[in-house]
Image (cartoon, rainbow, N blue to C red):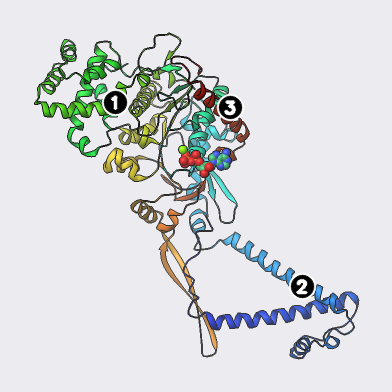
Amino acid sequence: MAKQLQPRGTGWSAAASPLFGLVALWMAVYLVWSVWAAAWLTAWIVDGAVPSFGVAWALALFTWDTETTWPGLPTPLVMVTSVLFVGATLALVMVGLRVFHGVRGDAEDAVTALNTGDETVAELARPAAAEKALRLRRSTLLGRKARSLKDADVGLVIGGVKRPRDKSGPTLFASWEDTILAYMAPRAGKTTAMAIPYVLAAPGPALATSNKGDVWAATAELREERTGERVWLFDPQEVTHQGRGMWWNPLRGVDNVEAAHRLAGHFVLTIDDDSKKDMWGPAAKALISQLLLAAALDDETLAIVGEWLHDAKQPRPVNVLQDHGFTAYADALRETQNIVSETRDGIYTTARTAARCLDDPAIMRWVTPPDDFDVDEFDPRPFVRSRQTLHLLSKSRSAAAPLIAALTDAVFLSAEEAAEGQGGRLDPPLVAVLDEAANICKIADLPDMYSHLGSRGIIPVTILQSYRQGVRVWTENGMEAMWSAATVKVFGAGLDDHKIVEALSKLVGQHDVSTGSFSFGDGKGNHSVQLRRQEIMQGSDIRQIAKGEALLFATAARPTLVEMHPWYENPDAKEIGAAIEKAHGLITAGARNRLPHGSQTQG
Ligand SMILES: Nc1ncnc2c1ncn2[C@@H]1O[C@H](COP(=O)(O)OP(=O)(O)O)[C@@H](O)[C@H]1O
Ligand SMILES: [Mg+2]
């Protein structure tokens, strides 16, 4: 990035021409003197003599009077020495400048301004980060020394502090009580520098959502090897073509209005049409939650909810709710069913759009009990106490997305319950990487959850492409809540929203920039320096953050530019590369065979 973040405001323009004359004159003097120095050096070596340097000597050189300039010395030898001499002095000057800048940096350069002096990020780096890990993970790191902790035990690696001139600074970690929010454009390193390394490094259970098979491909086999525990793959749209190796019952644990409402929320959030969402959304959510609760109470599966949504006159859910004592809920459902047909159709159509995955038998196979008993049921409760891995895949904005959100939410809830049973903090912590969260993991309560997940030992890593993408799902208020509750915020390459870019520029702050100017008058040159306040990173600098780099905002630390550590630059790159290769083979084979439904290759 140093390339783009050039020092600004050196005002040479108007005063340039007299200055260039002056510089050219001194260059000429330097060259003539260099030839003299080279001749003198040659004479010294071969035991000759050269007249002293002066105007007379220079004139002799210009008239090519070699008998005067270097009497008795071979001219070619003097010429060669001259070239070497000029080369050597220039090289010396360059090295000198480099060393000087390396020590001091460009005062105007953002990297220098932000990243010199480690005290403001010390809490995120070793040894402080390791000490903190020991404190937060008292039960699993008992008796360990801070020094002996591996990176993966210290925290999630955000990157190395970027230094002026290619050197890299200390590695910074998100701790086991942080909540992470990242914004990055496509191909900026979300998957390679965050999702994949975080899943591999998770000390306890790991969950990852993705709209592609890449995270699964890179981590599934290695996680299984390293933890010795099961890797689950919830892939209702067959992104990886690995067949169904698990199923999950979303209705398990839905035995009250609160739980039903929460589950219904994930469906309604997937309605893309904003006007429809505003007009019918709340009523559709109520309807879905009434039907979900009725289905759960009646020991039915999710499939029946789909049937009931197509039959607005169906009396059974009303009766079930009534029988189980949910009188108000039963009345509300009856009212919806008997409302004027236009309104009722609006509500039912919206609810059906939100829950359209219920109409897709291929998707429903993953959330309804299987005919064959080989397919294991995924239960979030033991999962959060294990070192297992759960991959959740869905194509962007697809029908299956609400199920991804619902399963993630169920894991969060189980993790919170488990944390309460462990003195408030889950240990080892749960790492939940929500890649492409705004497309496939629209958990309605996510912004609220951000304020307490970290303190329970649940580390959410929500990765979005832009702030606006988040606003579309969680609204402006929701995003503001998430923004302020996230303790680690990472801004990568390709941020393009002017509002966020300007806000970041303000948050990074200002510094003094010196502006040099040179004027030429009355036969002499004047150099003057002015100081002025200027943004350390202007909006355009933030827009130009390079791929693989990021601006980091962490609680109690100064904004810092970091170089992220993608998996392919880490020590285990070869191993991961091989795993990806192998997984791609499996995906290709799976796609070719179009595995018959119900077959199991994963587990
Ligand atoms: N093994 C690799 N070696 C070098 N570059 C890679 C490798 N794998 C991916 N990349 C590059 O890293 C960049 C970031 O990729 P990725 O993290 O998948 O982006 P995204 O932010 O969309 O998830 C891309 O430009 C990609 O081409
Ligand atoms: Mg990606």
Image coordinates of residue 207 in percent, x first then y, are 44, 27
- Residue of label 1: 356
* Separation of marks 2 and 3 at Cα, in angstroms: 57 Å
Residue at disc 1, CB closer than 8 Å to ligand 2 = no
Image coordinates of residue 272 in percent, x first then y, are 28, 36
Image coordinates of residue 241 in percent, x first then y, are 47, 24
57 vs 236: above or below: below
Please tell me the numbered disc located at residue 83.
Answer: 2
**Reading the chain from its start, which is encountered first: label 2 or label 3?**
2
- Does any portion of residue 487 appear in the rendered image? yes
Image coordinates of residue 180 in percent, x first then y, are 41, 38
- Does any portion of residue 126 appear in the rendered image? no
Indicate the amino acid at tag 1: Arg
- Residue of label 3: 582
Q: Nearer the viewer, residue 31 or 157?
A: 31
Residue count near mark 2 (Cα–Cα under 10 Å), binned few <14, some 14–19, many ≥20: some
